[in-house]
Image: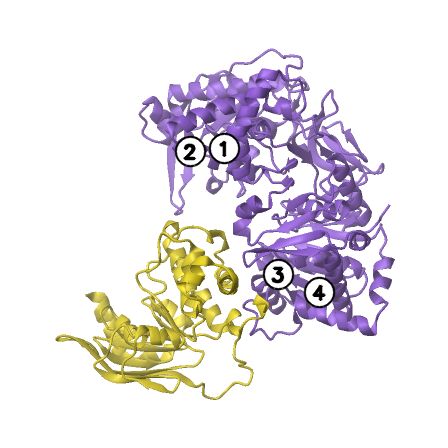
Amino acid sequence: MKNMLAEPPSVHLRPVPSSDAAAPAPEVVLDVRNISLSFGGVKALTDISFDVREHEVRAIIGPNGAGKSSMLNCINGVYQPQQGQITFRGQTFTHMNSRQVAEMGVARTFQNLALFKGMSVLDNIMTGRNLRMKRNLLWQALRVGPAAREEAAHREVVEKIIDFLEIQAWRKTPVGQLSYGLQKRVDLGRALAMQPQVLLLDEPMAGMNVEEKQDMCRFILDVNEEFGTTIVLIEHDMGVVMDISDRVVVLDYGRKIGDGTPSEVRANEEVVRAYLGGAVS
Amino acid sequence: MTSTFPELLNQHAEARPYAPAVREKEYGIWQTWNWRQAAEEVRAMASGLMSLGFAPGENLAIVGDNRPHLYFCFLAAQSARGVPVPLYQDSAAAEMAFVLQDASIRFAFAENQEQVDKLLELRATVAELRGIEHIVYDDPRGLRAYRQDGLISIQDLMAAGRAWERTHPEAYLAAASQVTADDVSVILYTSGTTGKPKGVCQTHRSFIAAAQGSVDTDALGPKDNVICYLPPAWVGDHLFSLAQWLVAGFTINCPESPGTAAIDLREIGPTYYFAPPRVFEAMLTSISIRMEDAARPKRWLYARCMAQARRVGADILDGRPVGVLQRLLYGAGDLLVYGPLRNVLGLSRVRVAYTAGAAIGPDLFRFFRSIGVNLKQFYGQTETCAYVCLQKNGRVKLHTVGEPAPGIEIRIADNGEVLVRGVSVLKEYYKRPDATAEVIDAEGFFHTGDAGVMDDDGHLRIIDRAKDVGRLTDGALFAPNYLENKLKFFPQIKEAVCFGNGRAEVCAFVNIDLDAVGNWAERQGLPYAGYVDLAGKPEVLELIAQCVSQVNADLAAEPGMEATQVARFLVLHKELDPDDDELTRTRKVRRGFIADKYRVLVDALYSGERRQYIETLVKFEDGRTGTVSATLAVVDAQTFAPLKSAA
């Protein structure tokens, strides 16, 4: 019998690729080319192109209805764009399906929480391991032999995530009883349980108070740093975006109006106009 | 007689290598270090420190939550002939600066990124702290990208130590064997509510004696379990989680995170437990709230069982004679209510529980004793290893802190101050011979600064800070804090201020608690417009008068306190507030300031006026000011003739 701790490296959270060498241009992980998406007569996205580099925090911002979530849904395979292509680690797709995307190492969280309210924090995060469970339903239901060992190995990963997100005190608490900010953390935990290479966060800080936002910022930066996960995030709070992102894409009415570092974007007149216009309405 | 902590550790590792020494919950599972592993890690850490140049007599700053490695660091520093200096983990960087500088810190142990950040910030910004050369950290999370000089993980330190031992095989033993009982084992900084913090130097001898005394008193042994969740820089934790751990050889358990202490308490089920009164209070509150929400039959059962517990619970615990029928009824209650209750609280296995640090409410204390938790009190301060008095099994008296502990001699000075001489008294204040001379007199007595009274059975009762104690004109001791605390144990009374020094009798100001009294008024169907209105209602005055007369009845039964019954009081029209300088930021009343500010009211209390008009300036939180005015009634309180030992 193999020792469960000595099972595949998937048991341990992925180490950071060594960044000591200060690589000149980090590799592009995700390249989005000329994406257009429409629902009937409504053009949600028009000819959007941008790229995401290894190990960066990339933000997508824009006023309400700008197409941010649609963009994420295209990457995630929830929506099928009519035009354009997405290249992920050299493989090009014209459309993706969600499972395929997940298997390639892309995880996401949702703007409106999609957790199992009646299940405990632990069980919710365990569902994030689903894709990596090899035993079939019957084995898992019986929970003996290899299935038990497999569960223990997955549990270990999940426990490390619980530790990482500092939610040990609520391990056994049904998610529905937790505050909104904590539920958001659990949602992030479930996405992390997939040990993704790219993490898509849809408004991780919506509806939070200042303190919860600060905590979440720290977790996002820590995920990025500790696990080396590339992060694509949609966020409304400009302060947060400017503080934690490496590069920002700005969308307005389905078009890209800006792309660059936070300071470049801040100086972009079209962006300022779009934001002020949005704020007035 | 074993004389040093490193020696004790090595003895346990020899005698019972595989017995559990420390547990810590990590990743959802309790991880155990046995004594041999603990000793090995301590040795590696000590060697690691020495390999980095940690010199004999040098201080090691330790800051963090309760973790096994943190406790090991204490022992590692001692083994390397140095002195551990724990700091409070929740202090801001600036607050740490003084201690780090005072103790000339070169080496520091920091639990995690938060603490490392503070130390690095201080090193970078404070010129006097440039000397912090080495920072050892336990939890590597978030520190991966740190490249600062002198930063080393505890794992790397231990690895360095093991490697160093190969070239210096004798160094560890040579150092550890040179540690003597009279070496300073730890410097604990007092919180410094008055002036700068002072480092209290305690020797191995004192702390081991203090631990031995309490271990003997309560028959603690290797089978006991303790959960350590209080700040390691506090003398109580040092005594309970480190000194007694090594003397008794029990198992200490570190919670998963500060937030999970209550859950971990239930999982571990400690046999020996310490908590400050507020923790017990929180437990009782949560029970009360949940019982109020329970269904009617359950509430009925709870009320009946608790009444029975109040009747005989404490007597059964103390082994006093109780009738068979009463015992049976209590047994039934234990099966139905007390047992499950203790289980829910995580106190099922507790043999001995202690509380100290603040006055504990009588109801609270009786509640826990009545449901079979052997809750006791002790008394001590940093300067005495928290070891002066303790309550012995079967000899627990509510208002006292117990009898002098083994090896301790107590004398009450003329001004009422408690003087202590014995095994646990401090060696000195670090680098402060002037301060040391101030507190230790020629006969070797330590002046505690607390005023106390010895009762006929030889139990010490702490009544106040010595500097606050005054006398009435007839010479009776007047202890304002003691009286005020008694009043404040009533939920209806939020604050109280007593006057009496140099006067013929005691009078008091009372602040009602708006929540408690407002709630009461609602249930009585008593309409009120606001705080001022409520505070002036005759019904409320009557309610407070009942509380005061109950305090008076208590005082009448206490020898030495009969004369300080409250003769008259008035209920203030506004809440005492730190913004108006009436309270300190830690909510202690500033008696002198209040007496000046409300001079007309004090005069009214003593001149026999029945009503007094007052107008007061108040400061609102946004900085604006306004006035509150009211006509207050002076109320006579019922007083009692002294009872001879009715307790």
The residue labelled by disc 2 is B616
Q: Quadrant of residue B516?
A: top left
Name the disc covering residue B597, or none: 1
Q: Quadrant of residue A116?
A: bottom left
Q: Name the residue under label 3.
A: B111
Q: Is residue B198 above or below residue B563?
A: below
Mark 4 neighbour class, 10 Å CA radius: few under 14, some 14 to 19, many 20 or more: many
Q: What residue type is labelled 3?
A: Glu
SS assignment at label 4: strand
For the C terminus of chain B, the image quarter is: top right
Residue A134 falls left or right of residue A94: right
Disc nearer the start of the sequence (3/1)? 3
Per the model, the C-alpha gap separating discs 4 and 1 is: 50 Å
Residue type indicated by callout 1: Lys
Nearest the eye: B452 or A181? A181
Give whichever of discs 1 and 2 has the lower sequence position: 1
In the rendered structure, the answer to whether residue B434 lies left or right of residue B129 reads right
Of callouts 4 and 2, which one flags the residue occurring earlier in the amino acid sequence? Answer: 4
* Tint of chain A: yellow
